[in-house]
Amino acid sequence: MKIMKVENYQNMSEKGAQFILEKLINREVNVLGLATGGTPVGLYEHLIKKIHNKGLSLSHLHTVNLDEYIGLAADDPNSYHQYMEDVLFKHIDIPSNNAHLPHGDAENVTYECERYEQLIHQLGGVDLQLLGIGNNGHIGFNEPGSPFDGRTMVVDLAPSTIEANGRYFKDPNNVPRQAITMGIKTIMDSKSILLLASGVEKAEAIKELIEGEVSEKTPATVLQKHPNITIIADEEALSLVNKTIV
Ligand code: F6R
């Protein structure tokens, strides 16, 4: 596990964007796993600028997102499809057919989970998966208690996640109660992982991830077992970690 300590959110975002950019330039990453939420917004902003500065074409790239809310169509303003369009896809030249997210409005969500898992397999797996972390230690929408051997599946969101994500909805009561998420095994199969964390509200989860006992009670602890994971976290997010990180 490689841990990079940075001062604040801006530094985390810039370092994270540079990390991804270099791998895109070297063609080490042809299938990029993406995350939504507040944490990666700054990274996407920096990445777009860097891609434009380099004149880099991403017409060959495939992206696969971690999750999508059940019941929201792709054009719903609160869907993760729409989020990705706004923060990244419309600013770069990735073909729309190459940008994949689970369909939250699929008629048969069980079939949709199988389709998504199969798609990742057909693409040859994820080269680099970007992750945030929930205050309760979730990764993707794998809430506490999720099985470490889980594949893409339908999950019930934890009350704390529904509350945390309410800030993005006009009416916080409209946060969907379920989502489709890549499973923990799907995430762990990624060839490399970049996890970002910023702010004191992530400090407990980051302490558990780095120093806690590996347990399904805190899904992120499974990442201790990943052979190629980099964490970029700011001082606040690392404030409860005992071991010295420079
Ligand atoms: C997002 C995702 C979630 C978030 C996590 C943190 O696709 O899968 O695990 O990374 O909920 O969200 P923020 O960044 O909003 O604190």
Image (cartoon, rainbow, N blue to C red):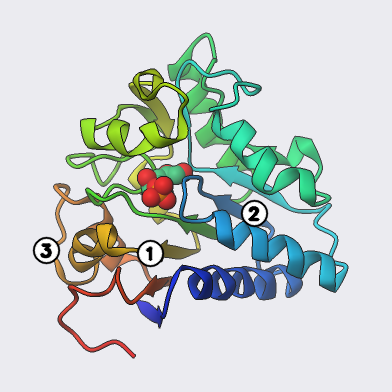
**Distance between the alpha carbons at the discs numbered 3 and 2:** 31 Å
Residue type, mark 2 in image: Val
Single out the residue that lies furthest toward the right. 55
Q: Residue at x 25, y 52 (%)?
A: 137
Q: Which residue is label 1 attached to? A: 198
Q: Is residue 30 rendered to the left or right of residue 215?
A: right
Circle 2 is placed at which residue position?
Answer: 31
The mark nearer the N terminus, 1 or 3, is: 1
Residue located 50% across and 57% down the image? 130
Where does the N terminus fall, quadrant-wise?
bottom left
* Label 1: element kind: loop
Question: Residue 24's x, y, as percent?
Answer: 71, 67
What residue did someone put label 3 on? Answer: 213
Amino acid at dot 3: Glu
Residue at 60% x, 21% y: name it.
76
Q: Secondary structure at mark 2?
A: strand
Q: Compare marks 2 and 1 and give the one earlier in the sequence.
A: 2
Q: Earlier in the sequence, mark 3 or mark 2?
A: 2
